[in-house]
């Protein structure tokens, strides 16, 4: 195997100093056009490839970004990751995708690990950390974007952008649809207690009841794991305890799929006995029987916008730390039809 070509080899062949080659490679400093072209020609002829470590020392950039999600198997986060990675690749960045497994302590360790790796920027999706812990975990990162999570910051020098779904409006839309179709006893499977999205969708659920001047039973609300198993277990328990329920609004589509399984086991027809509404509109929502009524979220766009906001911060663009809010769109299918 041939020896690796070094910067010193290029300098010797081009008849210039090592510093001149470094300036050409990193596109920094004063170098005449003629010398620059000669060095570039030698680099091409010799097949020189700059060391990533050396370049990062010179530019103070690693060319890497961190993306933290609570559950990499959830199609919602997979699509966000795709939106981030596609644009990151086009911009010349590699992405560390980190999975917290819905564990706040694991999330803290991941944030610290990414800080030690000196990633150039960080995107955190649906953090399960309390505000103070999240502030602590993000403090030493140079650029941060939060997806579906807001953070109140007293220190204005610590800039954080947020890309949000309007979960309150989404929860209202889903619940209002069930009410308008004649359902009156609507349960809410709210996802993890630590989920801001779940809390906001719950606010929308309660607002829809209030606007309709109807009474809401707090016992109809139940937290659950944000997956099919969580929907099945909590849905089964909730329907058994409250047989009067004629509708269920679910934290996400995976939970709703678990509810369909619970209803089938209990002999409750969907939508005849219980109408079911999910959230996210993942591909599975249209493949189950009956297909799910749900609130569609532009997941890929969430990821793409998150990376754009991150790059703006990293490049020092004015207004780099902003809030972007996307609306969720009701998609009506057979699990909760009109009327």
Image (cartoon, grey):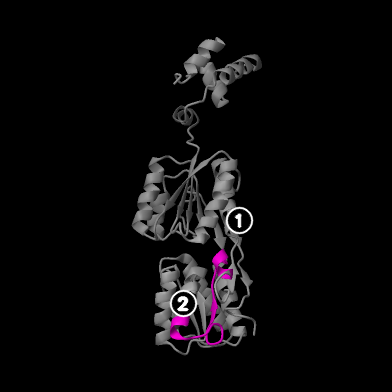
Q: Residue at x 57, y 69 (%)?
A: 287
Residue numbers of the magenta segment:
264-286
In the rendered picture of this protein, how many numbered marks are placed on residues?
2
The picture places residue 103, in percent across and down from the top left corner, at 36, 59
Left or right: 137 in relation to 8? left
Residue 55 belongs to magenta span: no
Left or right: 153 in relation to 32? left
Front residue of this view, candidates 44 and 53? 44
Q: Seen from this angle, which residue lies furthest top? A: 15
- Looking at the image, tell me whether mark 1 or mark 2 is earlier in sequence order: 2
Quarter of the image that includes the C terminus: bottom right
Residue 267 belongs to magenta span: yes
Task: Name the residue beneath numbered marker 2.
Answer: 261
For label 1, the SS is helix
Q: Residue at x 51, y 17 (%)?
A: 19
Front residue of this view, candidates 37 and 211? 37
Position above or below: 53 against 253: above
Left or right: 176 in relation to 4? right
Q: Residue at x 41, y 70 (%)?
A: 229
The picture places residue 149, in percent across and down from the top left corner, at 49, 60
The picture places residue 141, in percent across and down from the top left corner, at 44, 45
Q: CA distance from mark 1 to mark 2?
A: 31 Å
The picture places residue 100, in percent across and down from the top left corner, at 40, 56
Query: How many residues crowd around disc 2 within 10 Å: few (fewer than 14), some, or many (20 or more)?
Result: many
Picture quarter containing residue 280?
bottom right
Regarding residue 205, the answer to whether it shows in the image is yes
Front residue of this view, candidates 279 and 214? 279
Task: Name the residue beneath numbered marker 1.
Answer: 301
Regarding residue 189, the answer to whether it shows in the image is no
For label 2, the SS is helix
Query: How many residues crowd around disc 1 within 10 Å: few (fewer than 14), some, or many (20 or more)?
Result: some
């Amino acid at each position: 195997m041939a020896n690796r070509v070094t910067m010193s080899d290029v300098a010797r062949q081009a008849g210039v100093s090592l510093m001149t080659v470094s300036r050409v490679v990193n596109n920094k400093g004063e170098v005449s056009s003629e010398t620059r072209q000669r060095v570039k020609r030698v680099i091409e002829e010799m097949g020189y490839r700059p060391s990533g470590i050396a370049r990062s020392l010179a530019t103070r950039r690693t060319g890497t970004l961190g993306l933290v999600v609570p559950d990499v198997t959830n199609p919602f986060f997979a699509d966000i990751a795709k939106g981030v990675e596609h644009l990151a690749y086009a911009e010349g960045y590699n992405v560390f995708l980190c999975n917290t497994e819905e564990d706040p302590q694991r999330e803290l360790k991941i944030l610290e690990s990414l800080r030690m790796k000196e990633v150039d920027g960080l995107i955190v999706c649906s953090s399960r950390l309390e505000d103070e812990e999240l502030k602590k975990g993000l403090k030493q990162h140079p650029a941060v974007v939060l997806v579906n999570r807001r953070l109140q910051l007293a220190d204005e020098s610590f800039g954080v952008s947020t890309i949000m779904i309007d979960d309150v409006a989404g929860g209202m839309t889903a619940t209002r649809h069930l009410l308008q179709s004649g359902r009156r006893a609507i349960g809410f499977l709210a996802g993890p207690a630590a989920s801001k999205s779940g809390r906001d969708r719950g606010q929308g659920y309660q607002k829809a009841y209030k606007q309709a001047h109807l009474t809401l039973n707090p016992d109809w609300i139940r937290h659950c794991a944000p997956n099919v198993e969580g929907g099945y277990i909590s849905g089964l328990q909730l329907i058994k305890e409250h047989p009067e329920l004629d509708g269920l609004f679910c934290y996400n589509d995976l939970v709703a799929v678990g509810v369909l399984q619970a209803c089938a086991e209990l002999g409750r027809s969907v939508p005849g006995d219980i109408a079911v509404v999910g959230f996210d509109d993942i591909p599975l929502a249209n493949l189950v029987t009956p297909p799910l009524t749900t609130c569609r979220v532009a997941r890929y766009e969430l990821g793409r916008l998150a990376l754009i906001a991150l790059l703006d911060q990293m490049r020092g663009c004015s207004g780099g730390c902003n809030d972007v809010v996307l609306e969720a769109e009701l998609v009506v299918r057979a699990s909760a039809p009109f009327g």
